[in-house]
């Protein structure tokens, strides 16, 4: 007697895209099982603020029936934006006009909203997927890190940049973009770091020059989350001892010696450890041949640089579109997956190309002027999504 568990729909990864897919399926009466490597929903902090775009992220939340709950959680004033040069001169400033086109929300709050909207037990925590193999007829066997296995009729890789499901469909692997990040936080900023808080303002912040950048935003808990970014060889970050925070700060600041003191203070005053991160991307035109019973969404499908702010939005939209396609073709997953991927590939290619262009704009020889020119153009033309 075969006792191997079977799940009709399996989603690997409880990120925003995977959770939107599970929620949209639930809205349409389709059960799914989500497997995630984290021990529980509180195992990791979920990163900083996200601006949720009207045509993608907000559309996904509408499809999930969660738009009003989302609006109740947005960060007032979060659409404010400020662009500076390396001398800390403000070259562009936009106030939050309250139009709601790109409202800001804490990533953790958004994930909680999605998790709370799923039936209990939908997400299997502490379930790291080690790999999967086809069984024929669109079915797959999935193996977890603890050695347990199950079968599924539909397998969706929503498991991010280093997806364990992607190799079933594609040989592509993410490549280093030439940009390295070091992330840091300044806590209780208005009280403990008033100069930094005043510099960054209430929303998104860019300070650009010399192929380097400070990218920052204010979070709902009153902290400032800062990304220092620069063009660097892939082997640069490993030369820094990030277990020694003060030494790591000094090593990072060596690359900003002629930047304004107020900008350097963002690193010097940082609270807690600094976090290094290489920025990777899949090929802009990444796509695959139809594989029965399997597909990808989000970073697993189209990892791109973060400089257009589209990654989370696109992952959520992918999840919503896949859920709607499956609901529209009950009992015919292949027709649903074909329709989903036929729209996914050109959409993700356009957005990945935009993200790559935004990266070049931020690290341009004339930065911050190209970025200012782009934002200024939005004042005369409505913003459009890729």
Image (cartoon, helix red, strand yellow):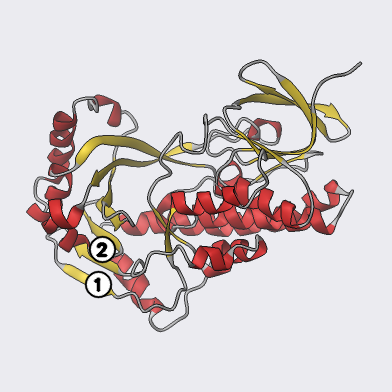
- Please identify the residue farthest to the bottom as the structure is shown: 380
Which label's residue is closer to the chain start, 2 or 1? 1
Determine the secondary structure under disc 1.
strand
For the N terminus, which image quadrant?
Answer: top right
Horizontal arrangement in the rendering, residue 211 relative to residue 76 (left or right) = left
For the C terminus, which image quadrant?
Answer: bottom right
- The residue shown at (31%, 70%) is 80
Q: Position of residue 220 (x, y in %)?
A: 33, 57
Q: Position of residue 162 (x, y in %)?
A: 54, 33
Pick the residue in front: 40 or 101: 40
Pick the residue in front: 353 or 120: 120
- The residue shown at (53%, 45%) is 303
Horizontal arrangement in the rendering, residue 124 relative to residue 52 (left or right) = right
Q: Position of residue 184 (x, y in %)?
A: 26, 43
Q: 10 Å neighbourhood of mark 1: few (<14), some, or many (≥20)?
A: some
Which residue is identified by label 2? 368
Which residue is identified by label 1? 92
Horizontal arrangement in the rendering, residue 267 relative to residue 296 (left or right) = left
Foreground disc of the pair 2, 1: 1
Query: Are the two marked residues, 2 and 1, in contact with CB atoms closer than 8 angstroms?
Result: yes
- The residue shown at (30%, 75%) is 95
Q: CA distance from mark 2 to mark 1?
A: 10 Å
- The residue shown at (29%, 31%) is 237
* Residue 40 in the image: above or below residue 318: above
Determine the secondary structure under disc 2.
loop
The image quarter in which residue 61 lies: bottom right
Q: 10 Å neighbourhood of mark 2: few (<14), some, or many (≥20)?
A: many
Q: Position of residue 275 (x, y in %)?
A: 30, 36
User: Is residue 386 something that shows in the picture?
Assistant: no
């Amino acid at each position: 007697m075969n006792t191997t568990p079977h799940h009709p729909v399996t989603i690997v990864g409880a990120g925003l895209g995977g959770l939107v897919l599970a929620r949209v399926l639930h809205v349409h009466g389709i059960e799914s099982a989500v497997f995630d490597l984290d021990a529980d929903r509180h195992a990791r902090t979920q990163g900083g603020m996200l601006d949720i775009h009207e045509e993608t992220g907000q559309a996904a939340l509408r499809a999930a029936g969660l738009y009003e709950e989302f609006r109740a959680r947005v960060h007032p004033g979060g659409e404010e934006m400020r662009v500076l040069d390396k001398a800390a001169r403000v070259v562009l400033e936009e106030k939050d006009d309250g139009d709601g086109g790109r409202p800001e929300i804490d990533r953790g709050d958004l994930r909680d909203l999605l998790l709370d909207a799923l039936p209990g037990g939908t997400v299997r925590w502490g379930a790291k997927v080690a790999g999967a193999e086809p069984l024929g007829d669109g079915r797959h066997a999935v193996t977890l890190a603890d050695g347990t296995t199950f079968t599924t009729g539909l397998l969706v890789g929503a498991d991010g940049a280093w997806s364990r499901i992607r190799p079933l469909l594609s040989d592509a692997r993410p490549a280093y973009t030439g940009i390295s990040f070091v992330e840091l936080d300044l806590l209780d900023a208005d009280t403990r770091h008033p100069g930094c808080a005043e510099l960054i303002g209430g929303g998104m912040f860019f300070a650009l020059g010399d192929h380097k950048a400070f990218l920052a935003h204010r979070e709902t808990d009153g902290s400032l989350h800062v990304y220092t970014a620069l063009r660097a060889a892939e082997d640069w970050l490993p030369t820094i001892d990030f277990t020694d925070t003060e030494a790591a700060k000094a090593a990072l600041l060596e690359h900003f010696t002629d930047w304004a003191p107020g900008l350097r203070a963002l690193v010097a005053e940082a609270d807690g450890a600094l976090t290094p991160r290489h920025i990777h991307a899949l090929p802009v035109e990444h796509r695959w041949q139809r594989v029965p019973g399997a597909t990808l969404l989000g970073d697993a499908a189209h990892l791109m640089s973060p400089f257009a702010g589209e990654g989370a939005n696109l992952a959520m939209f992918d999840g919503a579109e896949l859920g709607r396609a499956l609901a529209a073709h009950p009992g015919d997953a292949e027709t649903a997956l074909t329709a989903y991927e036929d729209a996914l590939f050109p959409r993700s290619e356009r957005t990945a190309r935009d993200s790559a262009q935004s990266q070049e704009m931020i690290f341009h020889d004339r930065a911050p002027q190209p970025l200012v020119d782009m934002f200024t153009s939005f004042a005369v033309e409505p913003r459009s999504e890729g």
